[in-house]
Amino acid sequence: MKKYRRDPAAVQSDILRRPYTRVFPLFLLPMFASFCIGFIWPFLQGLFLSFTKFKTTSKWTWVGLDNYVKAFADESFRYSFGYTALYAVVSVILINVLAFAVAYALTQKIKGANLFRTVFFMPNLIGGIVLGYIWSMIFDGVLGAYGESILTNSTWGFWGLIVLMCWQQIGYMMIIYIAGLQAVPEDMLEAARIDGANGWQTLIKVTIPNVIPSITICMFLSLTNGFKLFDQNLALTGGLPYIINPDGTAVHTTEMLALNIYNTFYGQNVNSRGTAQAKAVLFFILVAAIGLFQLTSTRKKEVQQ
C-alpha cells in the first residue's frame, strides 16, 4: 500500500495553529460576556417586567397578561403603529430610490464625484437630536411666512420627518449602492452595449439584478431605522399636535411607536410602566419579524439571480 507524506509546510502550519485554536475561546469570552450583560440580561429582565406592575425594577407585582391587554386597548398605541407603518413604507421607498439614483449618477465618471460623495454622506454624521432641532427651525421659518407651523399641522409633521430622514440616510445608503454598482462586471455591461441595449435596458436587465445584495442591505437598514425612529421624532415634533378623545385621552398625531413607548413609561402615571414595557416587547417582536421577513424575501431574489 502506497503511503503519502504530508507537505512539511502544511505540517508546520498545523503545529503553529494549534496554540491559537486552544486559546481562541478565551478571546471570545469577553465579547460574549459583554453581549450577555448588555443585551441578553436587560432583554430578559424587560420581558419579565412586562408581566408585572412596577415602579422600580426591585418592587413589582405579578399581573400576567394584563399589561398586554392594556397595550392593545390603548388607542394611542394603535394609532402610532399605523402612523409608523405608513412612515416606514414611504421613507423606505424614497430613501432607496433617491440613494440609488445619486449613487448611479456618481458612478458615471463625472467631475467632482468624490466631493459630492462626501457632501451627501456628511448629514449621516450629525446626531438625530441635532438634526431634529435644525430642521424644526428651518420648517418653522418657512411655514411661518404662511401662518403655519410643523407643530400644529400633522401633515407637515409627517413630511417633515420624511425630509429629515431622507436627508440623513440617503448619503449612507448611497455609499452601499456605489459599492454594489462598482462591483457589476464590466464585461456584462459591454456585452449589453454590443447587443444593442440602451441605457435604460442595461440598467433594468443588467445593473439592478447585480446590485440585489446592496438593495437587500439598504432595504433592511432603512426599514428597521424607520420603525425604530425616536430621537428625530422627539426633537422635530415631539408627537404634536394632539387630539382629545371624548373619554379625555389624548392621541398625538405625529407620535411614532418608540416615542409612544417613551411617553407611556415616563408619563405622569407611574403605574403604566408595566404597560410601556409590554409595548416595548411587542415593538421588538414587530421590528424583528418585519426585518427578518424583508431580509428573507430579498435573499430569495439573490438566489434566483
Image (cartoon, grey):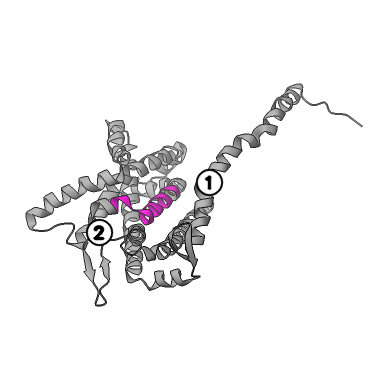
- Within 10 Å of disc 1 (Cα), the crowding (few <14, some 14-19, many 20+) is few
Q: Which residue is mark 2?
A: 158
Label 2: element kind: helix
User: On residue 48, which mark appears?
Assistant: none
- Within 10 Å of disc 2 (Cα), the crowding (few <14, some 14-19, many 20+) is many
Tell whether label 2 touches label 1 (CB within 8 Å). Answer: no
Q: Which numbered disc, 1 or 2, marks the residue that appears first in the sequence?
A: 1
164 to 265, vertically: above or below: above
Q: Residue furthest right?
A: 1
Q: Nearer the viewer, residue 215 or 80?
A: 80
Residue 149, horizontal then vertical, whole percent: 14, 57
In the rendered structure, the answer to whether residue 110 lies left or right of residue 65 reads left
Q: Is residue 171 visible?
A: yes
Toward which corner of the image does residue 196 lie, by quadrant?
top left
Q: Residue at x 50, y 46 (%)?
A: 38
Q: For the magenta stretch, what is the residue range?
A: 217-233
19 to 266, vertically: above or below: above
Q: Residue furthest bottom?
A: 246
Q: Nearer the viewer, residue 157 or 230?
A: 230
| Amino acid at circle 2 | Phe
Q: Is residue 305 visible?
A: no
218 to 282, vertically: above or below: above
Q: Nearer the viewer, residue 270 or 236?
A: 270
Q: Is residue 127 magenta?
A: no
| Amino acid at circle 1 | Ile
Residue 64, horizontal then vertical, whole percent: 50, 70
Q: Which residue is mark 1?
A: 37
Quarter of the image that includes the N terminus = top right
Closer to the observer: label 1 or label 2? 1
